[in-house]
Image (spheres, rainbow, N blue to C red):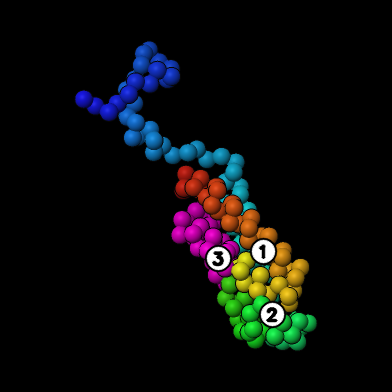
Amino acid sequence: MTNARIDVTNEGPGPRAVDPVASYYVETPVTGWTGWITFASVMLIVIGAFHAMAGFVGIFKDGYYVVPKKDLLVTVDYTAWGWAHLGFGLVAIATAIGIGVGNMVARVVGVIFAVLSALANLAFLNASPVWSTMIIAFDVLIIWALTVHGREMKALQ
């Protein structure tokens, strides 16, 4: 006895046998939502550039931020924050390139990066509230785009 079932919904001269396991794993078609992946990739490049700019400001212009270091959520030197943001920026840009070509590992790294970026900007909120809030909002959009519509990028490869 086989596990085949009869599919009477297909057009044709009569019913056909359909393998239920094979029909379960059929790839979903590519839709217009893949534009969100491109959006996430471009936004990751923008966020990477923002992190790099914040990093250069923290490294080279220590007196730029008006909030004293002791009033931050995490007490750390602005120069150290600058190097961390510069590193975040470089990772974001490299990850965005990987996402753009449909790499699954890059999608996972992109989600992890967006979570860490949001947490880092939450800790940096007192020093630059508008900038940090904007980056956190972009991070949430990136997480959504990569987790909801990322699977569709496989079909484009």
Give the x, y percent position of residue 89: 60, 71
Q: Amino acid at mark 2?
A: Leu
Q: Which residue is mark 2?
A: 72
Give the x, y percent position of residue 45: 62, 63
Horizontal relation, residue 150 to residue 63: left or right: left
The answer to whether residue 10 is seen in the rendering is: yes
- N-terminal of the pair, mark 2 or mark 3, is 2
Q: Mark 2: few, some, or many residues within 10 Å (few <14, many ≥20)? A: some
Q: Which residue is mark 1?
A: 136
Q: Is residue 137 above or below residue 29?
A: below
Which label sits on residue 113? 3
Horizontal relation, residue 113 to residue 2: left or right: right
Q: Quadrant of residue 32?
A: top right
Q: Mark 3: few, some, or many residues within 10 Å (few <14, many ≥20)? A: many
Q: Are marks 1 and 3 in contact (CB under 8 Å)?
A: no
- N-terminal of the pair, mark 1 or mark 3, is 3
Q: Is residue 56 magenta?
A: no
